[in-house]
Amino acid sequence: MKGNGIEMRGLTVTYASRMGTVNALSGINLTVPSGSVFGFLGPNGAGKTTAMHVLLGFITPTSGHASIFGEDVQGSIARQRIGYLPEHPIAYRFLTGREYLQMAGSLFLLEPTQIKSRAKLLLGQLDLIDAADRRISTYSRGMMQRICLAHTLMSDPDLLILDEPTGGLDPSGRMKIRMMINDLRTRGKTIFFSSHELSEVELMCDSVAILADGEIVAEGKPAALVGEDKSLERYFLRVTGTEKEIGP
Amino acid sequence: MKIRRIITIAKTVWLEALRRKDVYVLLILLGIMIVAVMSLDIFGLGGVVGYVKDVGLLAAWFFGMVVAITISTRQLPDEEKANTIFPLLAKPVTRAELLTGKWAGATVSATIAMLACYLLLAVLVKLKGGAFEGFTFLQCYLLHAWAIGVICAIGILFSTRLNKDAAATLSYVTAGAAFLLIPQIPRIVVNAQCVQRSGLLVLYYIMPHLELFDMRRRMVHDWGPASWSSLLYVMIYGLVLIGLLLVLSWLAYRRKVLSRADLF
């Protein structure tokens, strides 16, 4: 595969607000190798989603540069290889699950036979076959999350950007998503995801980066970072300065 | 721009219009309105076929405008509010494709809804013992569909930067003015003073002329079909207008920062 999965160099995003200038990201440098599972962590408001939105071309950075497999993120070529699952994803409620997947396939210009077989495969893998022809408005929270993940995977993307993919799911729902991520890892896909479930991150990620107030405060393999803190959770609380908020 | 992506986005708009109840409710209300107005028999005109045609076509124009503005102005704001815009634009879909697809979907949905309205009107006219002349009916519908295309483009333009209520209000004002007030400007301009005159003329030339698409009088008074060359000129004018409005929409939307409302 051409280049690293993700590269961010001096990425800065500032917003003008009524409170003055807000630095959402302050000169971030990050490299995510192709084929790795990378955890992007940080407290709420740290800038994780902003960084993801820059990668997806929703936000133009104030300065710096970001690329995906060597392609600038502002062009639509980079997005040809991305699958994105937003936090609390919502699908078109008036479509059926199958129609929603067909729509994704068409937007990626896949062949109709390919769309049909891929939709069938994903509906099966994510346990949605029985609900495939039901309107999405009748789906439960977990089913909504899974149909959105299937939508994300329709083009068999090389890079998956997942914003809290297991957020708000019950243990069985989380397990299904984790199994799917593991399956994608074995197939050599690059996965870049944010999560507040640090035990999950420790279990699944090759590397992590921790973001606080728009800056990367730690980066490396989870086992190497933890050290004396014994768990990623403790380490996270210490480096993000949130430890004092919860007391001893 | 890939046509298949535009069609896919447009198809989603059609499916939404088809599966939501609001268009059906509007159509039923329109039917009730026409029947009620006809049954009033004002000045003994209730039985006159021309009167039925006049009222029915006016209602069809009103209905077409309401449906076109309702569908077109909600597309982008609803996507942004529900956050469904993010997975959509995370795909290799350009913003130009998104806008064109939304416009095409809204236009076709409103035009099909309007066809139901025209068919209802044709049945009512038939019940009154009259009929529409085939070619004129076709031309009237065609130009009306073109006007719907322009109105949808106006709706899309306003909704790129405004919420759906504000976009709908501005679209009603613009379409209403373009249809009712702008054609009156040449008459007003004769008695206007220098600056006022220039201002009115600028307004006259920059605003869309929706009255050009209106063949109601020809239908009501049975004047027969318009020449196809005139029709062609009006259609070309409509296409240029739609193109300009979509380019303006793209300029307004291409760099719009899309952020989740709950982000900060």
Image (cartoon, helix red, strand yellow):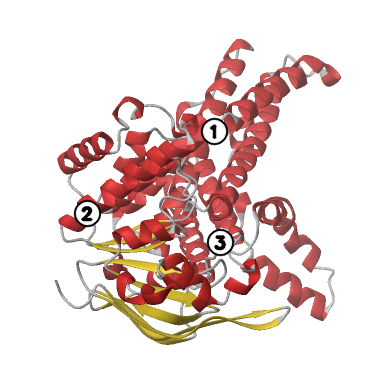
Give the residue pinned by disc 1: B114
Graded by Cα atoms within 10 Å as few (under 14), some (14 to 19) or many (20 or more), the crowding at tag 2 reads: many
- Residue in view at x 42 percent, y 61 percent: A198
- Residue in view at x 27 percent, y 53 percent: A181
Give the residue pinned by disc 2: A184
Q: Would residue B55 be found to the left or right of residue A240 on screen?
A: right
Q: Nearer the viewer, residue A219 or B257?
A: A219
Graded by Cα atoms within 10 Å as few (under 14), some (14 to 19) or many (20 or more), the crowding at tag 3 reads: some
The chain under label 1 reads B
Q: Would residue A207 be found to the left or right of residue A137 on screen?
A: left
The chain under label 3 reads B
Q: Nearer the viewer, mark 1 or mark 2?
A: 2
Residues tagged by mark 1 and mark 3 found on one chain of the structure: yes
Q: Indicate whether B264 appears above or below B216.
A: below
Q: Which mark is residue B260?
A: 3
Mark 2: which amino acid?
Leu
Mark 3: which amino acid?
Arg
Q: Is residue B221 visible?
A: no
The image position of residue B241, as x and y in percent, is: 51, 61
Q: In the figure, residue B181 lies in which quadrant?
A: bottom right
Mark 1 and mark 2: span between their CA atoms? 48 Å
Mark 3 element type = loop
Q: Nearer the viewer, residue B210 or A7?
A: A7
Mark 1 element type = helix
Mark 1: which amino acid?
Met
Mark 3 and mark 2: span between their CA atoms? 28 Å
Q: Nearer the viewer, residue A52 or A58?
A: A52
